[in-house]
Amino acid sequence: MRRPGLEPGFLPREVPPTAGLPLRVSELFGPLGACRTLGVESEKVPQRDQFLPDSPPHSGTMGQEDGKKWAAAAHSQPTIPKSDRLLVTDLPALAAQFLGVEEVGISASGSAALVLILQTLRRLRARRQVIVPAYTCPLVVLAVVQCGLQPVVCDVAPGSFELDLDHLAALCGPDTLAVLPTHLGGRVARLDPVLAVARAAGAFVVEDAAQAFGARVQAQAYAQALVEAPEGTQSVGLAGDAGFFSFAAGKGLSLYEGGAWLARDAALRAEIAATARQLQTPAWGFEAWRSLQLLGLALCYRPRMLPYVYGLPLRRAVRRGQLAQAVGDVFDLPIPLHPVGAWRRAVGARALRRLPAFQAALARQAQRRLPQLARLPGVTVLGVAPADAAGDDTAQRGTVAGDSAQGLWPFFMLLLPTPAQRDVALAALWPRGLGVTRLFIHALPDYAYLRPWLPAQHCPHARDLAARMLTISNSPWLDDAGFACIMAELERCLG
Ligand SMILES: Cc1ncc(COP(=O)(O)O)c(C=O)c1O
């Protein structure tokens, strides 16, 4: 397989670690006016065709009751009145339509959106602490610090990415400004218990949905933020006070760097929008650089180019033992806060039309692969109830949050029985270019560069995740043969 002259580890093809929507040339250069709306397309092409009323059940084990439920969900996609559709061409409006909310703000990144939200909350309530899960993206800590606030680390529940409720209750107090539950890997976190603890302390809840743009849950009584959700589903980010998404390279929808924020309450939305107007100052040189990077991403986000831009640097860093660098866990302050330029917004708006169908295809692929993963001895797939992993139809649903949630499947998060087995599996699979990798290398307190803001701390469950987890891409480029290779390797390591 190796080409002469290239360093060891070179592969002719590579699967990305997470399933991002590849951009089309027509989406880079089409005129803005040609950007039709989601509503127009959704009328002609069923976006969640696995939900169609007439389609057969997804699996033999799916009962008629479930079939009806899914059929109903087919009609739960947000729509806007026909008369409005052709007016909607820019990314904020299309993103709002996609999510089924009145308003979405676009920001320089997911962490920039978090900065805008936290700066706003801080103005509204004179408190200093922000509670974050011990296993999450280090950028979350930097965003808190950039706002002049104090990050406080809460351990995750055992074998889960969700906040440990006992620890959370112990940490919440009169100085808690906000709590940040996280929908990791597109899986939907249970929010009711977190909301109860946070509310009791008078704290805001900000949903980190950086990895969950498009995930939906059963609607609560939050109709004021919703345009229309006939079957009672709503986007993640609306159960708490505010939420944010990431459009970074490799995410479902990507602007190379970008993000979005939303808030349930109109008054809070107006406050965050005011913060954005105040803090987001145009940086044309930087925007030009980001535009070039997006162009580069569009050209290189394909299996034949990924070895050069992703695989080789990854494997070189792994060989040097620089694991945090290898997976891109090392970040700097300050987090840029400039507005996203018109060209990148237009690219995102055009690509967004294809996102629902892409995410539905990923869900179908996940549905086929989950039962195989569930058969691996001693392995837990995070964000999936065991019964679901065993072959139920529930790949659509973020079963962490219960039956009603419809999470996403950018990748699978697997907990192997022991750290040693995880390490052996990764040593075998990292060099193969099959999209198997690690998510965050450490629990937050274990990143040396975060030490100035995070004291050494006991967070055994987050450390356990860092030690036993690996992720498997759910990219459509990971074909059945590639997935079978991964399964064979995992079975060998677990045997
Ligand atoms: C869980 C989580 N939160 C926050 C962020 C920050 O988003 P961004 O990279 O767009 O700033 C990320 C980035 O991947 C993330 O995974």
Image (cartoon, grey):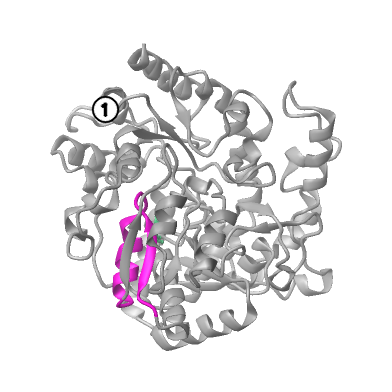
Residue 250 appears in the picture as rendered:
no
Tell me the element at label 1: helix
The segment highlighted magenta reads 127-148
Q: Quadrant of ligand 1?
A: bottom left
Q: Is the residue 235 above or below the residue 446 in the image?
A: below
Q: Residue 287: x percent and y percent?
A: 37, 74
The residue positioned 41% from the left and 79% from the top of the image is 119
Viewer-side residue, 451 vs 482: 451
- 15 left or right of 232? left
Q: Is the residue 289 above or below the residue 446 in the image?
A: below
Q: Residue 424: x percent and y percent?
A: 27, 22
Q: Residue 66: x percent and y percent?
A: 79, 34
- 220 left or right of 173? right
Q: Residue 389: x percent and y percent?
A: 58, 28
Let me know if residue 135 is in the magenta part: yes
Q: Residues within 10 Å of mark 1 (few under 14, many from 20)?
A: some
The residue positioned 33% from the left and 73% from the top of the image is 336
The residue positioned 73% from the left and 65% from the top of the image is 221
Viewer-side residue, 399 vs 70: 399
Q: Amino acid at mark 1?
A: Asp
What residue does disc 1 label? 423
Q: Is the residue 358 above or below the residue 282 in the image?
A: above
Viewer-side residue, 279 vs 136: 136
Furthest residue toward left:
320
Confirm or reject: label 1 Cβ below 8 Å from ligand 1.
no
